[in-house]
Image (spheres, coloured by chain):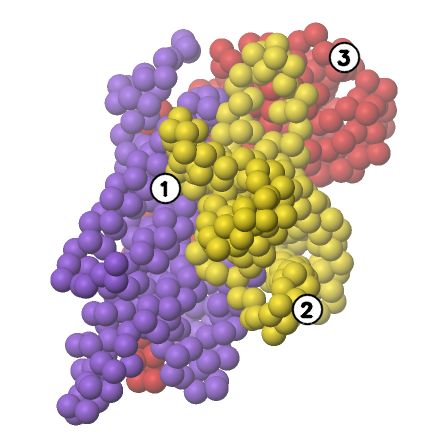
Chain colours: A red, B yellow, C purple
Amino acid sequence: MKLFKAFGLGLLASALAIGGAAAQGKTVKIATEGAYAPWNFTGAGGKLEGFEIDLANDLCARMKVKCEIVAQDWDGIIPALNAKKYDAIMAGMNITDKRLEVIDFSRPYASGLHGFATMKGSAIAKLAGLGQRANLDKDAAGAQTMIDEWKTLLKGKTVGVQGSTVNSAFLEKYLKDVITIREYKTTEQHDLDLAAGRVDAIFAAHSSLKATLDQPEFKNMMITGGGMSGGVLGRGVAVGLRKGETELRGQFDAAIQDAIKDGTIQKLTQKWFTVDMSPQS
Amino acid sequence: MDFEFMQDTFLRLLSGVPLTLNLAFTSVAFGAVFAMLLALMRMSGVKVLDWFARAYVFVFRGSPLLVQIFLIYYGLGQFRPTLQEWGLWTFFREPYWCAILALTLNTAAYASEIIRGGLQSVPHQQVEAARACGMSGFLLFRRIVFPIAVRQALPAYGSELILMVKATSLASIITMMEVTGIAAKLISQTFRAVEVFVVAGVIYLILNFTITRIIMAIEWWLSPHLRRPPAVKPALEAVHV
Amino acid sequence: MQHLSYFELVGFGPQGWGLALLTATGMTLAVALCGFLAGSVLGTFVAWAKLSGGLVARSVADGYTTILRGIPDLLVIYLFYFGGSAALGAIASLFGEDGFIGVPAFLTGALAIGIVSGAYQAEVFRGAFQVVSRGEIEAARSVGMHRWLMFRRIIAPQVLRYAIPGLGNTWQLVLKESALISVTGLVELLRQSHIAAGSTRRPFDFYVTAAILYLLITWVSTYLFQRAETHSMRGMRRAS
């Protein structure tokens, strides 16, 4: 039994040593998905790139801390934050009530629209409201009208969406009885399945859909219908933090405020999304 | 521990059990036929067939099942136009059939070795005795070789079935809503990973325990001449990962 | 963006993923090897508990192998990943630490593989131990060897010899098991292929490459284990 004890203590000691070292060297570990272009993605050779990588580096410089950015699967990104795998999430994550039950958010650093995409020539290509936008909070009636118009064309279709996102929450809430929802682990996977014809349409953030359209393999894909925001789609993209870490949250808030004020966020969103997506106050 | 939550989770995960069992049994059934062919190829003495079967077993046992699933589902999606021309696309379009195909091809590789072992374990005297009675060819195979081989191979095949039940959890990666798929979805709604996975683990344990018991019963029924139920302890040699 | 050929895609040019894939293959080997060794340590203890432990040790060991045999490895890895830090944090707070224990993905992966493969290796070791002749153990006892000395000089060398084929099988399992670690975010071979497939939208090219690399490792390690087996059996008399 002595050997057992020695082995167990040794394991624990090594784990403590690792944990202790991480706590001392003030490094903020930020998780991103690495599969959500142009927000965050993995470029040639496996390097993390994108709007949030640039922004995280900028914010960390403002906060005067050393940052380490790690890639993490989307569907476990919140439980792993609470399991202390890292300290913050910057992964195109919107502030929603549901998420606020388990984690905290900084102030938003970007916002955008969400909508459908399909292949050119499909029945869904004529979805109503292209170029228009509707807000589920400010213009609830208008948004509902647009959704009702969609229902006739979408009836019986299969729609791909990334699981545990605001997008899947939107489909669950407004279109569940009309369509078959198929959940994917990443947006890249539903893009592939749309092109492969396994789903009739996908629902995602316009910003990420546009990035897909730019790829040669997806030249026959198109955005269809109007753009949605607000309500279950969240109140802007922000840094996700563990509850009770008010100090870190304060630091992020101040840094984001600065970055909005001096035009850094506007500049970075222009660079990555070609439009200004800084949050509307 | 929040028992009300666990109970609720348990009930919701149960709805994934039919699909889990469906995937496991369907692929084991198809896989058995294919495995039989492979085993016969190995033992045919024809070099080309023998090498084909060897290469097949090497490829499917030597690479992770997850890679095979990704390759069949997303990889073949890249060749949609060609597959459509050949009329195969309706098959590959469905995640269900892709999962079945991947699991079938995989289990066939493992099972062919089990069947080969079973066929080789048939005592020579029995075959000679049958020959002496004038049996030959298919009759010999059907009456003597096959029943003995099945009895010999059953314990190993039982563990193969359990391994397949476990392997179906990988189908959740290609949008199948079996037990693990539902667990992942519940976690994304409740963010309580540990509790949900513990409950899912309990469900798999119950499933596999039941299957082990059933196999033990069948084995007992198939060996009237022994009738001292042997302890079925699935061997820990092969697993699908 | 122009269409790249397969060799440009997996090559070492500016658009190529060659280096990333090779690094990831190294990571696969590293995590599999560490997991395998952890499993050997665990497997030895479990085999020992099963063979000569008291009732408690034996039931714990039996429970461990039963559970590990009954639930999917993917679940074990998920559980370890999400539950591991929380459990360690709880233990650490007993020792007065502030409870922040970040377990790196590599360590999580290696430990998870160790726990799963430990169950398999325990059976391999147990089987091999039973082959060791009783007479030799009695002889060792009669010359006054202590348990540890006997383990080191008589039992361990022989068990290892008989266990080599079984260990070879377990190593293949561990290698394939390591692919599941990709779900925890560790950039090993499968995850890198997955990332590359998503980034370039060329899944077939990358998954085929991954499969080939896995088969290559399998092939080389099968050869090495065969060499080891032949080597360990030199000087052994064969029955036929």
Q: Residue at x 41, y 66 (%)?
A: C123
Look at the image and tell me whether residue C184 can be seen.
no
Horizontally, residue A116 falls left or right of residue B161, namely: right
Q: Estimate the spatial distance between the alpha carbons at disc 3 and disc 1, rounded to whole Å.
A: 41 Å
What secondary structure is marked by label 1? loop
Q: Residue at x 34, y 79 (%)?
A: A4
Q: Estimate the spatial distance between the alpha carbons at disc 2 and disc 1, rounded to whole Å.
A: 36 Å
Which labelled disc corresponds to residue A123? Answer: 3
What residue is pinned by disc 1? C188
What residue is pinned by disc 2? B2
Q: Residue at x 40, y 51 (%)?
A: C173
Which labelled disc corresponds to residue B93? Answer: none
Identify which residue, A84 or A113, lies in the foreground: A84
CB within 8 Å, label 3 to label 2: no
Whether residue A71 is situated above or below residue B8 in the rendered picture:
above
Q: Position of residue C90 (x, y in %)?
A: 47, 72
Q: Quadrant of the N terminus of chain A?
A: bottom left
Letter of the chain that mark 2 sits on in the rendering: B
Q: Amino acid at mark 3?
A: Ala
Identify which residue, B236 or C201, lies in the foreground: B236
